[in-house]
Amino acid sequence: MRLGAYLAPSVGRQAPQQAPLPAIYLDTTVGQVIGPVLVAGKTYTVTVTGTVSDWNLPLAKGNPLPDAAYPTTGGSARKSTQTGLDADTLFAWPSSGISHTAGHWTQFRIDGVHVEPEGGPYTSPASGHSYTYKITGKGAPVVFGWRDAPLNDNYGKLHIVVS
């Protein structure tokens, strides 16, 4: 046997680490963003942070925030940059002709459906408006969406990290 033909077992060796996936921003004026291909059967953690608005109106009911953590640009002139929604809750809304109650909200979608975050559903915003989801890869790109119509009056982006 040649000396080079013998390979020592990989004792103590670790599998190579996969590079972290880049952050994704879901612009609620667009409605969806296509993320990375996720390995089929592998469990991933998705962290979603940020606040948005479905309306181009001042938010007079609930507890609005003065601006989005991740603002959108362009589009029609804004009457208000206040935000009242995050990935799992409604916490402020306009008073004109809109009847809502603060609490759980289901507009954020992963692969076309609302997935409950860990510890959810929430009836009031999580600390930092940040939510963690566990999802299983399907061997295809993951799609993050915001279900609303029309989209052109929305404001803000959600910051998404897949790990």
Image (cartoon, grey):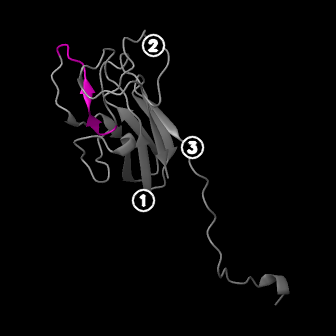
Closest to the observer, 49 or 30 = 49
| Residue 8 point in image, percent of width and height | 72, 84
The residue sitting at 67% across, 79% down in the picture is 10
> Quick one: quadrant of the N terminus?
bottom right
Task: Please say if 80 is above or below 159.
Answer: above
Q: Which is more foreground, mark 1 or mark 2?
A: 2
Task: Please say if 136 is above or below 148.
Answer: below
Q: Is residue 82 left or right of residue 8?
A: left
**Which residue is disc 3 drawn over?**
22
The residues colored magenta run 87-97
Q: Quadrant of residue 53?
A: top left
* Circle 3 crowding by C-alpha within 10 Å: few under 14, some 14–19, many from 20: few
Q: How many numbered marks have been drawn onto this rendered protein structure?
A: 3
* Tag of residue 81: none
- Residues at marks 1 and 2 touching, judged by CB atoms closer than 8 Å: no
**Which residue is disc 2 drawn over?**
75
Task: Please say if 105 is above or below 136.
Answer: above
* Circle 1 crowding by C-alpha within 10 Å: few under 14, some 14–19, many from 20: few
What is the CA distance from the residue labelled 3 to the residue labelled 2?
A: 26 Å
**Which residue is disc 1 drawn over?**
41
- Residues at marks 3 and 2 touching, judged by CB atoms closer than 8 Å: no
The residue sitting at 38% across, 50% down in the picture is 132
* Dot 1 or dot 3, earlier in sequence: 3
User: Outermost residue, bottom direction?
Assistant: 1
Residue 137 in sight here: no
